[in-house]
Image (spheres, grey):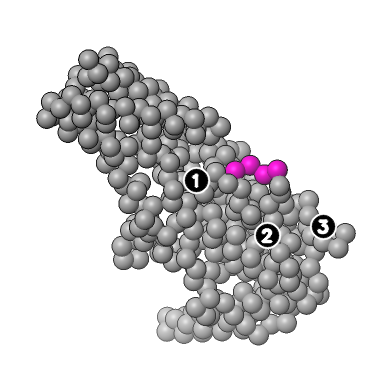
Amino acid sequence: MCIRKFALLFILILTLFTSKANSQEITLSNTAEVSVLTCGTGSEIYSLFGHTAIRIKDSIHFVDQVYNYGTFDFSTPNFYLKFVKGDLQYLETSCTFEEFFQEYLYEKRSIDEQILNLSQNKKQALFDYLNASLQSEERFYTYKFIDKNCTTMVINTLNKIIGKPIIGQNTENALTCRKILYPYFNGHFYVQLGTSIIFGSKVDSKSEQLFLPSELYNNIQNLKVNNQPICKESKKIVAFEKEEIPFSWWNNFYLFCLVFVIIIALNKPSIYNAYYMILGFLGLFFVFAGFYSLHRELVNNYNVLLFNPILFSVVYFQYKKNKKGILYSSVFCFICLFAYVILLINKPYLGIVTPIIITSGLRLAQLILKNKR
């Protein structure tokens, strides 16, 4: 029994030593391969966009490591506040390919591999850089929705080794970030609504750099460097049919519409006032988030034209029975609402906020007609 324990301890020490040697002291052989792994989307919110990682394989030296920049720690103090503020630290981590494969196999998420056409010097430089950064503070980075995530960090790392920004550059006719992101939330209505209204004007512009795994996959697949394809070979490691999201009785657009139909049908001032208070508080949150957060995506949020804090004034003047105050504040909010509709004409989420627009517009019109006499 003691001999068995000693043997297990010896194997563990040997494994750790070998792993350290593999990651820090190995000169890759000529058969070594560097590839980009693109993983499919999952059902959890954090996995809706897929994932990107770098794989380095050298069978001669028994190296088969995956490096990725998508790791975070839920136990971080004030995790959600840090996430909203935009100073949450993500980090580079490494694991064996087998561990990586088993995780995605368990989650039923596909893995596509693109073997890169890199020189031996570039492969070695990338291997050394990734392992050195794992042992330094450079492994940490401040996560951003669009500008810094698992995909953009892989792009930056590869371009740093190549020596010029070749991989992941956006095209002139690319869609806006908002239009690219919007379909990924299909089947998750309230997440789709929430992300649509909390994002500001930045996501209506085109990102200079690709930021989603599937976009990077397509970019690498068709990219040439010095008239040579950057992708030497592409293959599907594991494939899964995308599971259809089951219908939810509460997480859908139809129930959302029904709520507003009921508000309009009841037509009670107390209900409308409660409704306006909710919109006003959301508007204040958007304004606060724009100033508080370091996420540039939350700045200049024109959705405050719909979730308008001035609606508090409409409720206040009704309570005071101040007809002039009701009229002026209602007219102001109605003008803001009209401007909002104009802004949203070419936005993908106009349809899902239409029930809010109609409900707010009808009540404001009622108040204006009633108090202008």
In terms of depth relative to the viewer, which is nearer, 302 or 293? 302
**Mark 2 residue crowding within 10 angstroms, few (<14) / some (14–19) / many (20+):** many
Q: Nearer the viewer, mark 3 or mark 2?
A: 3
Q: Which residue is mark 2?
A: 36
**Dividing the image into 4 quarters, which one contains the N terminus?**
bottom left
Q: Secondary structure at mark 3?
A: strand
**Dividing the image into 4 quarters, which one contains the C terminus?**
top left
Q: Is residue 342 above or below residue 28?
A: above
Give x and y (percent) for residue 223. 78, 55
Instruction: Write down the quadrant of residue 128 in the picture.
Output: bottom right
**Mark 1 residue crowding within 10 angstroms, few (<14) / some (14–19) / many (20+):** some
Q: Is residue 212 above or below residue 355?
A: below
Residue type, mark 3 in image: Lys
CA gap between label 3 and label 2 equals: 16 Å
Q: Earlier in the sequence, mark 1 or mark 3?
A: 1
Q: Which residue is mark 1?
A: 201
Q: Which residue is mark 3?
A: 224
Tell me the residue at 62%/74% (across/down): 130
